[in-house]
Amino acid sequence: MTTLRFLVSLITKDNDYQMEQAAAAKAAAAELDVEAQIIYANDDAITQSTQLLKAIQAEPSLRPSGILVEPVGATSFPQVAKTAAGTGIGWAILSRHAEYAIELGKTARSPVFSVSADQVEVGRIQGRQVAALLPRGGSILLIQGPSVSSVSRERHMGLQELLAPNVHATTLRGRWTEESAHQSVCSWLRLMAAQRLRIDLIVAQNDAMGIGARKAIDETIPDPERDQPAQHGRSHDLDGESAALRDRRSGAFLHRLRAISRHRKARSAASCE
């Protein structure tokens, strides 16, 4: 009996969640006695599309039995999916809903489907966390994923639903990685030189960007000028589940600050260079 082979196409190696997905795929493959090849798109949609088409158009003996894709950009590769289905290769989209999957699945010889968390609800969870940490309102620094990402847009939609009118959000962009958020916050801190703006909370759409933002803050603002990190899993327990676990599940990383003010501008510019 021929061993089934699966190709798992992920966004980047520079993200703990992506690496966890790769490890989970390898573990599942070992348990099911199938093969799993992991490839990374280096955060580039064209690279990802090219990699997928190369695998689909390979010699029949070298083609995968199925392909699992977490798309980099705005598209879920409907044309690539049709090509895969036309050659009998199974197709699965991860972490977003592919609207074409139902129709394509009706005529395909192989399985076609998408799997995703409720990203709007993930945003609502963040909204509840903000409400718990800032019951009287305040200012947040929001680190979002790429604008082309439906995951980022839907999480933001859910957050906005529950964000109180007395919570002001300043929004920056990252690319789901620690380094991208670090660079974004450092650049923002340089622009803060002529302003006085209080930031009470950092809210990131995934853990990696939260860690990058925290790193930029730690490099910039000395300990005596920062509040202690919010204590997760105790006073902010939501619906019986620890907030630390909820943070991990929702991709939220929350850290309380005191202020980022004009008199810190020299320190900000030097630390983030």
Image (cartoon, helix red, strand yellow):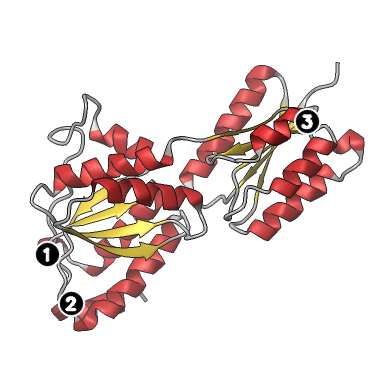
Q: How many marks?
A: 3
Q: Amino acid at mark 1?
A: Glu
Q: Is 37 placed left or right of 256 in the picture?
A: right
Mark drawn on residue 191: none
First of labels 1, 2 by sequence position: 1
Tell which tag, 3 or 2, sits nearer the viewer: 3
Can residue 146 be seen from the camera position used here? yes
Q: Is 111 placed left or right of 148 in the picture?
A: right
Q: Amino acid at mark 3?
A: Thr
What kind of element bears circle 2?
Answer: helix
Query: CA–CA distance between discs 1 and 2?
Result: 10 Å
Q: Is there CB contact under 8 Å for labels 1 and 2? A: yes
Give the quarter of the figure containing the C terminus: bottom left
Tell which tag, 1 or 3, sits nearer the viewer: 3
Residue count near mark 2 (Cα–Cα under 10 Å), binned few <14, some 14–19, many ≥20: some
Residue bearing mark 1: 225
Can residue 36 be seen from the camera position used here? no
Q: Residue furthest left?
A: 136
First of labels 3, 2 by sequence position: 3
Residue bearing mark 2: 264
Q: Where residue 25 sits in the image (x, y, percent)?
A: 60, 31
What kind of element bears circle 3?
Answer: helix
What kind of element bears circle 1?
Answer: helix
Q: Where residue 41 sits in the image (x, y, percent)?
A: 64, 53
Q: Amino acid at mark 2?
A: Arg
Residue count near mark 3 (Cα–Cα under 10 Å), binned few <14, some 14–19, many ≥20: few
Identify which residue is drawn at 79% across, 49% down: 53
Which quadrant of the view contains residue 197?
Answer: bottom left
Residue bearing mark 3: 107
Identify which residue is drawn at 79% across, 36% down: 85
Q: Is 7 placed left or right of 95 in the picture?
A: right
